[in-house]
Image: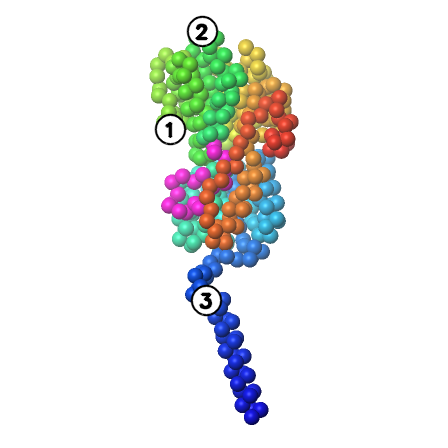
Amino acid sequence: MKKMIRVLLCTVLVGSSLIGCGSKNDTSDGGSVSSSKANAKGDINIEIVSKGFQHQYWQAVKKGVEEKADELGVKIHFVGPNSESDIADQVQMLQNAINAKPDAIGLAALDTEACLDAISQAQSSDIPIVGFDSGVPGAPERAIVANASTDNYNAGEIAADEGYKAAIKERIENASEPVRIGVITQDATSESIVQRGLGFIDKIAKLCEDDGKTVTISGNDKYVSDSKVEKADNADVIIDVAVPAQVTSELSSLDVQTMLNKKDTIAIFGTNQHSSEGMVTGNENLNKFGPDDDQVIAIGFDSSEVINNAVKSGEFIGAITQAPVKIGETVVELCVKTANGEDVSDVDTGCQWFTADNMEDKEIAENLIE
């Protein structure tokens, strides 16, 4: 009898064990099996491929990435080329990131076209990519699951609108001859920088045309062809776009000096930290930037000690600051969500116009990099 009882007990225990094991994957109640990507947070590995390290902007993005990764308890590997001209280096870094088989990749592409093969490989390997800072236009469908970035076209429009209201409108109205508005831009390949430039160009042209002025565009072919401005003869306003052959401080400063030495130049806009700091360097011996009627209006983009001081001193009438720390935080959040099988969508991380009058306001000061 005792032997029979022991056999019955064993049978019950084994049966219970089997039922318990089977219940983990039981979907009969309408639930679903957890995605293979739904790892414990500490097991999530994220590769972040940035545009570089040489600007304080990218150090701020990196800070946001590291802080959010620590908060969420995930592992990150943050890389970037030494210069934003080193496109081939970034492509190799992206390839290395894919080879590491992470749960997700954050990518700020220097050149979308150069990255397309690697992006396709990531997609075929079921590795989701979250874009940041720049979008990745032209990527294979669904390869980029979301973007964490400033709406760069809109940011360029804001720079144009604020600069026009503050000084450019009056300067054009008082001009007896055609005037020139310069756009100093780092390159014609980075989507974020191109969009800022085009946003500024298209908006400033519209504002001028709304005030009864004719507008034309000259300079770099990419911006000329992609803008909404039609080339025309004898226009009241010339928008002149300069792009250096390489991303170096010397060449950008030279572009600024060339623009400043054109007697009809009334304003210059720089599309990022590199270009804006190039404006300051290019103006050092010329001293032509400033708010007075006989000076050239300067408008910057991004923030740094150099740019902030230029705004504070009145050398620049103002600049646009992004939220780089928030961009870093957001790309990690999106990577973690997509690694866990959650739906994600684009996040506009915002921007602000800052001047000497408002740059110490709390909501702006926290985004100004020193």
Q: CA distance from mark 3 to mark 1?
A: 55 Å
What residue is drawn where x is 43% and y is 16%? 208
Name the foreground residue: 115 vs 71: 71
What residue is drawn where x is 52% and y is 50%? 336
Q: Quadrant of the C terminus?
A: top right
Residue where numbered disc 1 is placed: 226
Colouring convention used in this rendered image of the protein: rainbow
Residue 86 in the image, given as x and y percentages of width and height: 49, 39
Q: Assign a secondary structure to mark 2.
A: loop
- Residue 68, which numbered label? none
Between discs 1 and 2, the one toward the N terminus: 2
Residue 180 visible somewhere in the drawing: yes
Q: Amino acid at mark 3?
A: Asp
Which range is magenta?
135-152
The question of residue 150 being in magenta is answered with yes
Q: Assign a secondary structure to mark 3.
A: loop
